Amino acid sequence: MESSPKGESEELQDSVLSSSSFSGLASSTDASFSEESAGGGGSWFGLSDISSFAQSIKRSIPPAIDSIADIIQRSAMTVAAEFTQLERDAEERRWQDAVENGDIIELPLPWELPSIPGEEQTDPEPVYVEDETLKEHILALSLVEETFMTPFVDTDDQEPDFELDNSRIHLMRRLLVIDTNLNEAHARIAENYDQNEMQEIIFWKNYFYHCNKLRSDHESIIVEKEQTLIETDDRAAADLIESSTTASRGFDSCCGVVSFSSEDPSPPPHSISTGDLVLVGFEGDDLDDLVADIGDIGN
């Protein structure tokens, strides 16, 4: 599903910026009870009668009024929190439906790496698996304020791996739910900059920059380890072949037997057979006498 730059910008404000509510209620949901709000017609959640009653007896029983006000405030905040949760759940269902319908491509989480396909795997789509070590390092990024402030300080700074589209926004939403520290850092940024879109983009550009750097370094370490294992296996195989070749030629000291390798082009110098027995010897060996002796023993 294609969207114009203006549409993406609006979705960023509507979808990502509003996600600061994941870490708690937004300031608009905070309610306070005051004499001015209680005195007008039609107060919060139909509580005008209670408000009037509270005002009439406030002078005579101040502690009771304070308790009622506190109860009303807590009730209002509880209801507001429930509405916020319902709205958030509905928004999450809309995004998930878009993914299932193919309108949005679900990007892998920063700590998910493509697995090596097996022989039985016929699906051309890569399968991503969670790397626990990489996940631990990336989650630690959210604890460092510098992560969101460098290296980019302006939206004009180019970051080739950062593209703000619906798939990226969906990934942001998933990360805010998974990483509570990231959610809190994002809420602070949104509050400090009054949900300024430019600061929002810088926040995410810096975050994904550090994620990609950690991911790249981690993948390089994995490749180096695999290459080391391959080289070690190759050296072990070469040593085994060399030792086998050496043992197949010349004199075997442990057994006192002369053996010949199939790779040796020179034939045995002399051989003679008697019955099922074949005798092999070097030039000068008197094999005929040995055969005669064997015959005498047999008789």
Image (tube, grey):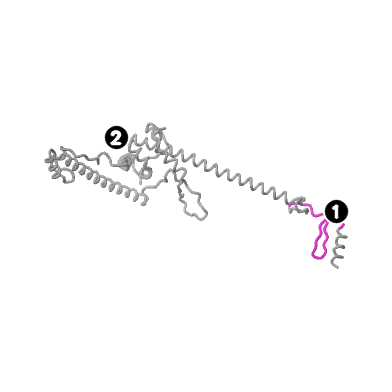
Magenta stretch contains residue 52: no
The quarter of the picture where the C terminus appears is bottom right
The amino acid type found where label 1 is placed reads: Glu
Tell me if residue 299 comes above or below residue 204 in the rendering: below
For the view shown, which residue lies furthest in the bottom direction? 299
Tell me if residue 148 comes above or below residue 90 in the rendering: above
Earlier sequence position, callout 2 versus callout 1: 2
Magenta stretch in the rendered image: 263-286
Circle 1 residues within 10 Å: few <14, some 14–19, many ≥20: few
Cα distance, mark 2 to mark 1? 102 Å
- Residue 62 position, x and y percent, is 16, 39
Q: For the residue labelled by badge 1, is the local secondary structure a helix, a strand or a loop?
A: loop
- Residue 25 position, x and y percent, is 28, 42
Is any part of residue 168 visible from this angle?
no
Q: Nearer the viewer, residue 134 or 53?
A: 53
- Circle on res. 283: 1
- Residue 157 position, x and y percent, is 40, 32
The residue shown at (47%, 47%) is 114
